[in-house]
Image (cartoon, grey):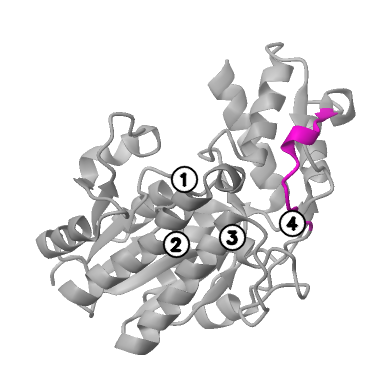
Amino acid sequence: MAKKRALITGITGQDGSYLAEYLLEQGYDVIGMIRRSSTVNFERIHHIQDKVTLVAGDLLDEVSMIHLLREHRPSEVYNLAAQSFVQTSFSQPVFTGEVTGLGVTRILDAVRVVDPGIRFYQASSSEMFGKVQAVPQSETTPFYPRSPYGVAKLYGHWITVNYRESYDMYACSGILFNHESPRRGLEFVTRKITNAVARIKLGKDKELRLGNLDAKRDWGYAKDYVRAMHLMLQQDTADDYVVSTGETYSVRRFCEIAFGHVGLNYQDYVVIDERFYRPAEVDLLVGDPAKANKNLGWKPEVTFEQLVTMMVDSDLQANK
C-alpha cells in the first residue's frame, strides 16, 4: 500500500513542527511548504529536516500552490501558515487579511482545481470568538472577533465551510484554543513569561513587563493539539471542531506557577506596562471540547501546570 502523503503549510512554526513529527511517526511522507525568503528559520524542524521534503510556495500566490499540489499529489493538506500574532495584526491589518484570510481561499481553490478529493484542514482560532457571546465556547457559539487577526481567521473559517458545502470537498476547521510549548515564539505572552523567568533566575534580567494580567485563556499543549488535527481528517465526514482543555487560567496564574517553579514570587518582578494592552481586549476564552472528545476520541494529556513548568525548564536550559 502506498504511503499517505501530507502537505503542511507553515511547517517551520510551532504547530507545523509538531504535526510533521507526528505524521512521520504515523508513516506519512511529509511535504513542507515554506516561503522563499532569506530568513526562513528551520530551528523547530532541524532534527527532522532530512526526513521531510521542503518546497517553496506562498499563500499570496495561488499559481505556486497549484504547481505544488500537481507535483507532489498529497492526500491531505494542513493549512497552518498565517500571520499569527494578534498584536501585529493591528499594525499590519491588510497583510494579515491577505495571508490569514484570502490565503485560505487561494489554497482551497488550488485543491479544487488540482484534486477536489484531497482532504483539507484549516487552522481556525479561538480568537474568532473574541468578545465572547457564551461561556464556554462551542462549535455553535456566535463569533465576535476583536482583532484584525480574529477577523481574518473568521474569513478563512467560513470560506472553508463554503467550499465544503459548494464543492462537496472534505474540508474542515479546527477551532483551536491557545496551545503553547517550548517551541512557542518569544513574542507570545506565555513564552515571554517562561523565558523571562529563566533569565531572571539566572541573573540575566531583573523585571518582566506585561499588559493585562487578568485576561483568561484556555491553554493546552501544542503537541496534544496536532493529534486532533490529524484525527479530523480521518473521519467519514468533514466537520468543524473546538479543540481545547475546557479549563481557563489568568495570565497572573501563569506567572505564579512559572515564577514559583524556580522559587520566586512573580510580584517582585512583573511590571504592568500599558503598551502591552490590546486596542480591543479579549478577556475570557474557554472552550467546550465535548464534540472532539466524543466524535474524535480526543483528550489533552498534558495539564496546565505541566505545560508551564515544561516551558520554564526548557528556557532554563536554553539560557544557560
Q: Are marks 1 and 3 in contact (CB under 8 Å)?
A: no
Q: Residues within 10 Å of mark 2 (few under 14, many from 20)?
A: many
Labels 2, 4: front one:
2
Alpha carbons under labels 3 and 4: distance apart: 11 Å
Instruction: Please identify the residue farthest to the top as the structure is shown.
Output: 203
Q: Is residue 318 visible?
A: yes
Q: In the rendered structure, which amino acid carries the disc numbered 2?
A: Gly
Image quadrant of residue 88?
top right
Q: In the rendered structure, which amino acid carries the disc numbered 4?
A: Val
Query: Does the magenta segment cover residue 273?
Result: yes
Asked if residue 283 is positioned above or below residue 305 in the image, the reply reads below
Image quadrant of residue 91?
top right
In the rendering, which numbered label is found on residue 282? 4
Alpha carbons under labels 1 and 4: distance apart: 23 Å
- Magenta highlight range: 271-283
Where does label 1 land, which residue? 14
User: Which of the two residues, 180 or 262, is positioned nearer the viewer here?
Assistant: 180
Element assignment for label 1: helix
Element assignment for label 2: helix
Q: Position of residue 59 (x, y in %)?
A: 32, 55
Residue in the image at 70% along x and 73% along y: 137
